[in-house]
Image (tube, grey):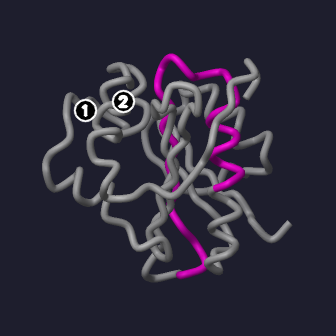
Amino acid sequence: MRDGALVVIRPLDPTDREAYLDLFDGIGPESRYRRFLGPKRQLTAAEVRYFLEVDHHDHEALVAIDVSTGTGLGVARFVRDRMDPGVADSAITVVDAAQGRGVGGALLARLAERAREEGVDRLSADVLQENRRMVAMLLHRGGRPAPGGGAGVRHFELPLNS
């Protein structure tokens, strides 16, 4: 990472429940709004199950951990499109204290690698237009604006064949 912290990125596991909830607590209201495209005070029990119980094939989730503290810094995931298995919807969340330090870019790089390993040709993402860091990161990594989205939301596709 940019500040020299040693970070490990690994698959998220159902046993990471408490660490995942702690990570969610490290995401402020504005960052939650940007991630969920609307207000999100807390996760429901069903959402926690969904976010943690992944098959690592059609639904992958990776967590970034600060090795020195053991704390979670971010999560990236993709969910394969059932109608078009070559496409997967993606999302990245980084705790407020770690934003701007390269965690999101590292998570995206590893997520893209995992998606390619699982036969995904491109990642898609819906991003609030105001989320300039995420828009810039997607453009920097080869993401292209694509049709879709909605009011105040930009849809991106990131080809993985390169």
Q: Which of 126 and 162 is in front in this view?
A: 162
**Disc assigned to residue 32:** 2
* Mark 1 Cα shell of 10 Å, populated few (<14), some (14-19), many (≥20): some
Q: Residue at x 43, y 80 (%)?
A: 82
**Disc assigned to residue 28:** none
**Disc assigned to residue 40:** 1
Find the magenta span and give its range. Answer: 85-110
Q: Is 62 positioned to the left or the right of 112 in the image?
A: left
Secondary structure at numbered mark 1? loop
Q: Which residue of the protein is positioned furthest toward the front in this rendering?
A: 68
* Magenta-span inclusion, residue 87: yes
Q: Give the Cα separation between the discs numbered 1 and 2.
A: 6 Å
Q: Residue at x 64, y 33 (%)?
A: 103
Q: Residue at x 22, y 58 (%)?
A: 49
* Magenta-span inclusion, residue 94: yes
Q: Nearer the viewer, residue 30 or 99?
A: 99
Q: Which residue of the protein is positioned furthest toward the left in this rendering?
A: 45
Quadrant of res 37 = top left
Residue 68 vertical position relative to residue 116 in the rendered view, above or below: above
Q: Which residue is drawn at 86% across and 66% down?
A: 162
Q: Which quadrant of the figure contains the N terminus?
A: top right
Q: Is 17 positioned to the left or the right of 44 in the image?
A: right
Q: Which of 111 and 16 is in front in this view?
A: 16
Q: Which residue of the protein is positioned furthest toward the right in this rendering?
A: 162
Disc nearer the start of the sequence (1/2): 2
